[in-house]
Image (spheres, grey):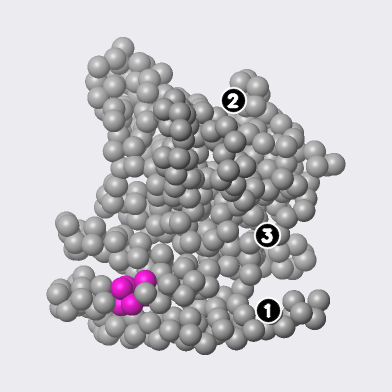
Amino acid sequence: MEEYGKILVFVMPIFLILIIIEKIYGHYKGEDSSPNMDSVSSVSSGMVNSVKDVLGISITLISYDWIVSKIALFQLDATFLTYLIGFIVIDFYGYWSHRLSHQINFLWNKHAIHHSSEEFNLACALRQTVSSFVNLFTFLLIPAAVIGVPAKVIAITIPIHLFLQFWYHTKHIKKIGFLENILVSPSHHRVHHAINPEYMDKNHSQIFIFWDKLFGTFQEELDAVPPVYGITRPARTWNPIRINFQHLGLLITDAWRAEKWQDKFMIWFKPTGWRPENFETKYPVAKITDVYNFEKYGFQYSKKLMYWSIFQAAFTLLLITYMYNSIAVIGLPNVFIYGAFIFLSVYSYTELMDARKISLAWESLRFVFGIGLIIYFGDWFGIDASFPFATSIIIGYLILSLFITLYFTTTNFQKSKVLQTQTQKIL
């Protein structure tokens, strides 16, 4: 928990700097692929995912430690070669877990968030799941366990493997020469994120592209077929927590409505997107049928809301940074309470980004929760010992956030709706 938090404190600024550089470069080239609201949503998704991971809010049914203790034929030392073997096995594991997440209905729920952006940029790489609470795929690491790759090697290699998947989420790098035959490139991954029929469910590899070529899922990016990004059942929200559970909600609803018991059971294991017979007619769900002709989600009620959303994400990131740096000081179970506040914060301000009036209720709850924590602990989880007056700043922020949310929900949204109505009448 504490070690992973320290790693993220180091890695997060690097990711943010690269996201900003991509934004500036895209603006300079006239090819901005990073709309601000989309990027805020993506970064917010990354924040709640990282909090979940740091807090260890998941269950591994069969741990790698247990597997290696039972079936290892050798005991390897943690040498460079051992790390290389571990890395390749993890990439094999990543290919199959990724591919299965695209092909099985209930597994798609944990992966849909990553594909939910209708853009393709570095920020969307941070759209990672918070809805996956059980790790089902440890058995794919059996090859490493058989030859005795130490658990410590796997534990160190997994986050490195994950971080190395960040760079190829961009439209600005076209091809990478002969390395296209070895590594997953931005071109390969643009295909993977596309919803064009030619590209669907292709290029599942994470670092080495040869897995797709070996198992028949490779597709080259075609000049005549520009990739269109997103998911065929569009999310229509900036709220990453909502997105994380949309598909699950549909599965539960369809299973409940299904008349046949076999449909109630099999819906979870059928191919992604499968629904019982005639459900598309009886219970229609918005779906993109023409990938070249649909309206992207991205309405903004005002630039004020956009700038406020950026500020909210930035302040929340500061709160998370303190949390990761101070896990030992905050202690258990208080660090879980801190995590709950972060989740509530992200939910509240992304509801506001969606222009939902209910966001005022969520913000009021967050205000009461935050002030209650300060009253209970005497300050903000011991922060004043390191940063004098920080608690006062947080109190001021909570008050400001409540009043600005009140402004948007009672005044700004109304003005914007009037302007939109007038514009539609003119058109």
Nearest-to-viewer mark from 2 and 1: 1
Determine which residue is flagged by label 3. 296
Pinpoint residue 178: horizontal percent, then vertical percent: 73, 33
Residue at 35 percent across and 65 percent down: it is 344
Residue at 37 percent across and 71 percent down: it is 362
Q: Identify which amino acid the numbered label 2 is placed on.
A: Trp
Nearest-to-viewer mark from 3 and 1: 1
Query: Are there few (<14), some (14-19), or many (20+) residues within 10 Å of tag 2?
Result: many
Query: Is 174 on the left or on the right of 372, as rendered?
Result: right
* Mark earlier in primary sequence (3, 1): 3
Pinpoint residue 173: horizontal percent, then vertical percent: 71, 50
Query: Is 276 on the left or on the right of 174, as rendered?
Result: left
Bounds of the magenta span?
362-367
* Mark earlier in primary sequence (2, 1): 2
Mark pair 2, 1: CA separation: 49 Å
Q: Main secondary structure of the magenta part?
A: helix
Can you see residue 178?
no
Query: Are there few (<14), some (14-19), or many (20+) residues within 10 Å of tag 3?
Result: few
Vertical placement of 181 versus 73: above or below? below
From the viewer's side, name the closer residue of 57 and 7.
57
Would you say the residues marked 2 and 1 are in contact, meaning their CB atoms lie under 8 Å apart?
no
* Mark earlier in primary sequence (3, 2): 2
Residue at 62 percent across and 51 percent down: it is 286
Is 395 in the magenta?
Answer: no
Secondary element at image label 2 = helix
Determine which residue is flagged by label 2. 211
Determine which residue is flagged by label 1. 420
Vertical placement of 166 versus 136: above or below? below
